Image (spheres, rainbow, N blue to C red):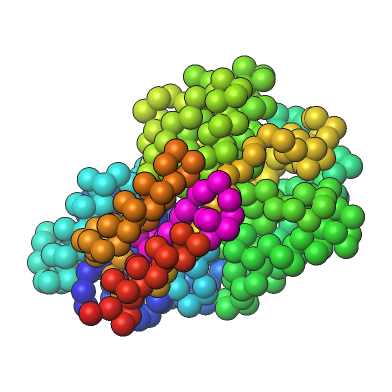
Amino acid sequence: MAPARFGTDGIRGVANIDLTVELAMALGRASARILPAPAFLVGRDTRRSGPLLQAAFSAGVAAEGTDVIDVGVLPTPGVAYLSEQRGLPAAVISASHNPFADNGIKLLGPGGVKLGVGAEESIEEALEAIVADPDGGPPRPSGRRVGRMEADLVGADEYRRHLGGVLEGRRLDGLRVVLDCANGAASTFAPGVFSDLGADVVAISCDPDGTNINDGCGSTDPSVLALEVLGRGADLGLAFDGDADRLLAIDHTGAVADGDAMLALFAVDLSARDMLVGNAVVVTVMTNLGFRLAMAERGIVVHETPVGDRNVLAALDAGGLTLGGEQSGHIVFRHIATTGDGMLTGLALADLICRSGLALSELSAGLVERVPQVLVNVPVLDPGRLGAAETVWELVSEVEAQLGDEGRVLLRPSGTEPLVRVMVEAKSAELAADLAVRLSAAVEAALGPDAP
């Protein structure tokens, strides 16, 4: 069994093949050693492999003498909220937006935030030691010192109350909303939260069976949601991913509003209400150039980070800032939450629509004039080899010289899947597509399954 390495969002792989019971248990033991606490919170999404891996990880934690509090099926931001409130480390068994056969383990520190690189490296070292010698390390606890496992019966309600209070007494009466819960962790939460606040709710993809999470639904495929919004004459559609930490929105015309679009709306709204600390917003390198231009026109400062909501959060905390996010729909309201929260984002968007009296399409009109952007995911054997692919970077230099100041190129290895992500922005969609095809072909030739 080879020890796993942390990506941008925990450890992921095909459940029971890459992410095995043995690895999950060893990771539980390593996490308990590096994150000492009286108890560890553990939650999951709706994948079939979730209970299996949760049981293994929890057994590893308890084997090190730490109690385990099982919060059951709960969105990642819900587990993060409980971690923050109770001052306990936590784990979420989830592969987020990945297909159901994948699973993952995300770790959170006692404040409800994702671990820093140093803590992850320490856990990896402990994991390697346990895999190499399961009986090494400190003596195993026995008797009363063995960790206990117990179910938490109140955490879900605590999170619901937290979401219900984010609008500070305002309501969503009269707003018709279609919620696509991706057959994931939002399925038992989102409809009730929005209904309690007065919205007229239609819920779809709320029947998880362990295998249908993210399957033709949710933020990975909002096409069915768009049809529902149009067919029901709804004001708004909201698409969550499997663990409900990201969101895409659909306006009443069926058009998609991604993270860039929503982040621009929130930044302008908070700035107008003198609630945008530093009059600044944090984004990643994937954010469209048009967003940066729109913020500059309005005097809002844009701080840029590498991809990953952990990097966004670090920049927010370093600057004491309020708002940040990613094009994918991870949006962090730092004065309210410790991580991206799809339901919180959806509530904030619905609240903005109700306060303004304008449709989402009207709010968005003319705000961000997008520079044509093409994204291509290239399957590769080892994304980590991208940095040494000289032929690829030679072509990147040629393309950047061709674009000049009128576009951008970004190539990066995925931190969650065996992919290299290719992004090109150019003055025309045709040029962006052509250049993206050339770059993708070069990546595939250098790193793909048939590469030398």
Which range of residues does the magenta coloring cover? 413-433
Instruction: Residue 198: give x, y in percent of width and height.
Output: 83, 43
Judged left or right of residue 390, residue 247 is right
For this rendering, which residue is in front, 191 or 384?
Answer: 384
Judged left or right of residue 435, residue 211 is right
For the point 26% across and 47% down, the residue is 117
Q: Residue 394, relative to residue 343: is it above or below?
A: below
For the point 78% across and 42% down, the residue is 361
For the point 16% across and 65% down, the residue is 128
For this rendering, which residue is in front, 219 or 50?
Answer: 219
Q: Give the position of the C terminus as an image quadrant.
A: bottom left
Instruction: Residue 195: give x, y in percent of width and height.
Output: 80, 49
133 part of magenta stretch: no
For this rendering, which residue is in front, 82 or 266?
Answer: 266
Location of residue 21 by image quarter? bottom left
Q: Residue 159, relative to residue 440: is it above or below?
A: above
Location of residue 344 by image quarter? top right
Q: Residue furthest front?
A: 402
Q: Residue 36, relative to residue 73: is it above or below?
A: above
Q: How many marks?
A: 0
For the point 28% across and 71% down, the residue is 446
Residue 79 visible in the displayed image? no
Q: Residue 339, relative to residue 32: is it above or below?
A: above
For this rendering, which residue is in front, 298 or 7?
Answer: 298
Judged left or right of residue 138, residue 162 is right
Location of residue 68 by image quarter? bottom left
Instruction: Residue 170: give x, y in percent of width and height.
Output: 77, 31
Q: Give the position of the N terminus as an image quadrant.
A: bottom left
Instruction: Residue 167: give x, y in percent of width and height.
Output: 70, 33
419 part of magenta stretch: yes
